[in-house]
Image (tube, helix red, strand yellow):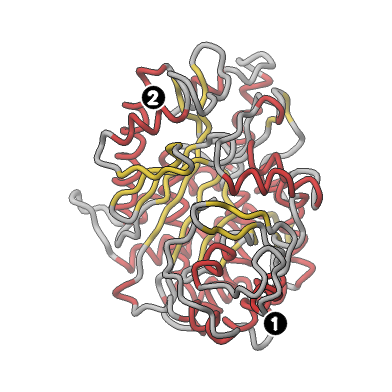
């Protein structure tokens, strides 16, 4: 969840300006980049509790420690809430989950180096405070009411609004972590094709990355409970966006969707004004009661873009949003999976051939069944595991054709190995943790914090 937009405060001339804004993201292939984001849960070593914001051993102190590595500070109301450096940022999710939003980089090798450097800096800042960090999709131990809240105006507004539109929105905010990949497109037609392929295959990514089987210290009956949480967060701004597969879909249709997503806030003079549930269309017409007669700027629209949470999100690039948080090698693996599928023409063609005849009912059955069953979900006479293996084959070939090699001569396909191993075994990270829970952990989730911390 981002901070306020840094777009210029240019007035919006009308709907066409918004379409042009999205279309301006198109880039020639040589300018395509990879942006990787990941979130992680902090915990105190002695009692595994999430650290609060304030205090000698709070999340603010962790940010202060990371800042020593050359990051610039970002404050809100005098409180340190983020760090920025070279188009990357370190930000706070609502309950203090720490997020790296990586810089747009050319290769997966650079992405992995960036991630490793970040985790090194986090550990260097957190170890003296006796704080650790864990990559999983859902907080395995602590209840919603045990989670702290970070001092960000945007979250205060969302916290008040979420219970009005779904029963799990506060869990989404405080108890989930994800990995995301942001990728470019060359044109409207290229965007449409990538959007359709990635939306159809997002449940496969969810299955491969399923790593949230515990709630409140017990198995919850799901393998990706994080994914399940999104089904009861806010129907106005989540889901599979069936219209993406309809004839004529493009930037205009996505703008129309965004204009119908209820607002959360307007950012003015360093303050978040509560506009929860109000209409951006009314704002466009100068009819927003908070700011009578005022019309939005592109900065307002850029902020509004970040308040839609579909499985794939269009900004001036495409965001893949289906994966649970996880360890270092799966952070790299998510970007490898999508780069392999979407950044090579032959791979994109093969992936489209795989999904183009999925019916609306099949797409929804995948989305609804994968949180509980992951790779074991039945699909077309087989299971999602077979579908996952087919997509991994396509992605691997795409990465090999890209032929971006590291200093040791390895191609980017090396980063798919954890996913290939899991798909061949037919066992997700969630299922492996459940086996430990019922075996050597003797019914406790506490060991997860030590055995799977960064």
Residue in the image at 57% along x and 72% along y = 296
Residue in the image at 66% along x and 16% along y = 444
Looking at the image, which is closer to me, 59 or 434?
59
Left or right, 444 with respect to 326, comes to right
Q: Quadrant of residue 361?
A: bottom right
Q: Quadrant of residue 329?
A: top left
Image depth: mark 2 or mark 1 in front = 2
Q: Is residue 211 above or below residue 433?
A: below
Residue in the image at 45% along x and 83% along y = 187
Q: Is residue 248 above or below residue 302?
A: below
Residue 171 percent coordinates (x, y)? 70, 39
Q: Is residue 127 above or below residue 84?
A: above
Residue in the image at 35% along x and 17% along y = 128
| Residue lying farthest to the front in this orientation | 292
Q: Is residue 181 above or below residue 171?
A: below
Residue for badge 2: 126
Left or right, 336 with respect to 116, comes to right
| Residue 380 seen anywhere in this rendered image of the structure | no
| Residue 333 seen anywhere in this rendered image of the structure | yes
Residue for badge 1: 246
Residues under labels 2 and 1: Cα distance? 48 Å
Residue 221 percent coordinates (x, y)? 77, 35
Residue 36 percent coordinates (x, y)? 42, 53
Q: Which type of secondary structure does the marked residue at label 2 adopt?
A: helix
Sequence-earlier tag: 2 or 1 = 2
Crowding at mark 2 (Cα within 10 Å: few <14, some 14-19, many 20+): many
Residue 344 percent coordinates (x, y)? 40, 72
Looking at the image, which is closer to me, 322 or 382?
322
């Amino acid at each position: 969840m981002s901070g306020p937009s840094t777009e210029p405060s240019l007035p919006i001339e009308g709907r066409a300006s918004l379409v042009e804004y999205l279309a301006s993201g198109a880039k020639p292939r040589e300018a395509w980049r990879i942006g990787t984001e990941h979130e992680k849960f902090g915990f105190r070593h002695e009692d595994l509790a999430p650290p609060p914001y304030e205090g000698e051993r709070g999340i603010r102190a962790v940010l202060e420690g990371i800042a020593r590595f050359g990051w610039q500070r970002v404050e809100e109301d005098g409180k340190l809430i983020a760090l920025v450096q070279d188009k990357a940022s370190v930000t706070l999710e609502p309950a203090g989950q720490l997020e790296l939003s990586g810089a747009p980089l050319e290769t997966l090798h650079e992405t992995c180096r960036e991630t490793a450097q970040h985790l090194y800096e986090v550990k260097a800042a957190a170890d003296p405070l006796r704080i650790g960090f864990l990559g999983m999709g859902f907080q395995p131990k602590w209840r919603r009411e045990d989670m702290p809240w970070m001092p960000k105006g945007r979250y205060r507004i969302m916290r008040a609004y979420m219970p009005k539109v779904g029963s799990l929105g506060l869990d989404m905010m405080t108890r989930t972590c994800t990995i995301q990949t942001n990728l470019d497109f060359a044109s409207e037609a290229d965007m449409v094709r990538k959007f359709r392929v990635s939306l159809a295959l997002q449940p496969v990514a969810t299955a491969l990355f399923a790593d949230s089987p515990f709630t409140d210290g017990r198995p919850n009956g799901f393998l990706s409970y994080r994914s399940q949480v999104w089904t009861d967060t806010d129907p106005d701004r989540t889901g599979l966006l069936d219209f993406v597969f309809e004839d004529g879909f493009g930037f205009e249709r996505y703008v129309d969707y965004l204009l119908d997503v209820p607002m959360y806030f307007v950012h003015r003079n360093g303050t978040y004004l509560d506009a929860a549930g109000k209409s951006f269309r009314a704002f466009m017409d100068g009819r927003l009661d908070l700011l009578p007669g005022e019309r939005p700027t592109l900065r307002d629209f850029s902020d509004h873009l970040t308040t839609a949470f579909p499985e794939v999100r269009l900004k001036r690039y495409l965001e893949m949003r289906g994966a649970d948080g996880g360890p270092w090698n799966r952070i790299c693996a998510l970007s490898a999976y999508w780069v392999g599928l979407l950044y090579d023409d032959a791979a994109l063609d093969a992936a489209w051939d795989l999904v183009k005849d999925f019916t609306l009912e099949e797409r929804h059955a995948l989305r609804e069944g994968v949180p509980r069953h992951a790779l074991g979900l039945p699909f077309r006479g087989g299971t999602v595991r077979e579908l996952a293996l087919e997509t991994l084959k396509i992605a691997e070939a795409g990465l090999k054709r890209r032929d971006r090699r590291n200093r040791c001569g390895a191609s980017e396909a090396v980063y798919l190995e954890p996913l290939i191993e899991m798909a061949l075994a037919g066992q997700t990270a969630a299922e492996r943790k459940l086996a430990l829970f019922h075996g050597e952990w003797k019914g406790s989730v506490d060991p997860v914090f030590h055995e799977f911390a960064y």
